[in-house]
Amino acid sequence: MAFGNGKWVALAKATVPALNKNQFALTSTDGKTWTQSAAFPLNANIISLEFDGTQFVASGSVPIGGEAKAAYATTADGVTWAEFVELPGVVGSSVTVVPVGTTLLFAGQRGGMSVKVGAGAATTYLSPFVGHNVFAACTVGTRVITAGQIDATKNTDPPITYSDDVTTNAGWKAGIEPTVIRRVSTRFYDLACDDTRQLAVGAGKDVWVSVDKGVTWTLGHPESEGDGTTWQKIEKANGKYVIVGWKGAYGVTTDGMNLATSTIGGSTRDFEATATNGTIIVAGAGGVYNDPSTPAELWWTQP
């Protein structure tokens, strides 16, 4: 899900067998009323959607030449989509895109990265942190921060990295390794960044905070490792950060240090998508925890 050009665009996948698990685009002008606007190739798995200031950029895995390939496509309005273009060298279907000016950085599993500069073709390289599976990325000025999960076989690689030059792998550096403090912090699923503060959230409902653009990180509001809940997404609106996750959990904080938590409508649904226009936040939930057959829902709040 993402917001831009005065519109929310969300991606949803049908689980009804008759629809062959097709994936669809939904659009909304107010975050409350939604319309199905487009359908994607059969068995597409598009998992990342960002607005780059001009257009929406979607990336993930789509069938190309009879195989599932990492690919991306663009749209200005969520209705008319360009054809998906393959991203050679980006590993796996979990592909995250982050706009950096006129540059698009695509990051996938096991250090696979691809960069598209302006109108040129995408070029591929491998991150020096080959054990780093990227799930989220954000920008602070020209700096890019990525967050993800450590490969168990490469546990010396950091779950958080940053770079001031994303056109090659030479600029990437390791953020401070939080796993020396808490085991669950080997997995981060989302980031919220501005010029003064950067927050990272993930497994165990931990919230980690940086005030130096991703170089060092401090454990903010901790939660029990054994509570079985995971934060999935974080957005900032009206000066507050709203976090959503598994089992209908949500939290609100102004700084990452003090967090008020509850559940959305007493829900046990898994919230896995968010977007904001700076005033309201929309959150999307799939099925009930461990039961994806329940129809998806979209909720909104004005924190």
Image (tube, rainbow, N blue to C red):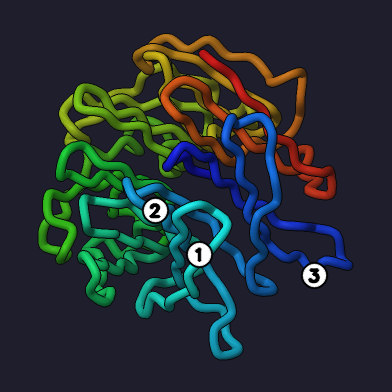
- Name the amino acid, label 3: Asn
Residue sitting nearer the eye, 46 or 29:
29
Q: How far apart are marks 2 and 3 (CA)?
A: 29 Å
The residue where tag 2 is placed is 55
- The x and y percentages for residue 137 are 34, 46
Q: Distance between the residues labelled 3 and 1?
A: 18 Å
First in residue order: circle 3 vs circle 1: 3
The residue where tag 1 is placed is 60
- Residue shown at 44% from the left, 67% from the top: 72
- Which one is closest to the eye, mark 2 or mark 1? 2
- Name the amino acid, label 2: Gln
Residue 190 position (above or below residue 152): above
First in residue order: circle 2 vs circle 3: 3
- Dot 2 falls on a residue whose secondary structure is loop
- Name the amino acid, label 1: Gly
Q: Distance between the residues labelled 2 and 1?
A: 17 Å
- The x and y percentages for residue 257 are 37, 13
What is the quadrant of residue 193 in the picture? Answer: top left
Residue sitting nearer the eye, 233 or 155:
233
First in residue order: circle 2 vs circle 1: 2
Residue 139 position (above or below residue 238): below
- Dot 3 falls on a residue whose secondary structure is loop
The residue where tag 3 is placed is 20
Q: Is residue 25 left or right of residue 184?
A: right
Could you tell me if the residues under marks 3 and 1 are in contact, i.e. CB atoms within 8 Å? no
- Residue shown at 30% from the left, 51% from the top: 99
Q: Residue furthest right?
A: 18
- Dot 1 falls on a residue whose secondary structure is strand
- The x and y percentages for residue 211 are 20, 24
Per the rendering, the mark at residue 4 is none
| Structural crowding at the residue carrying mark 2, measured as other residues with C-alpha within 10 Å and reported as few (<14), some (14–19) or many (≥20) | some
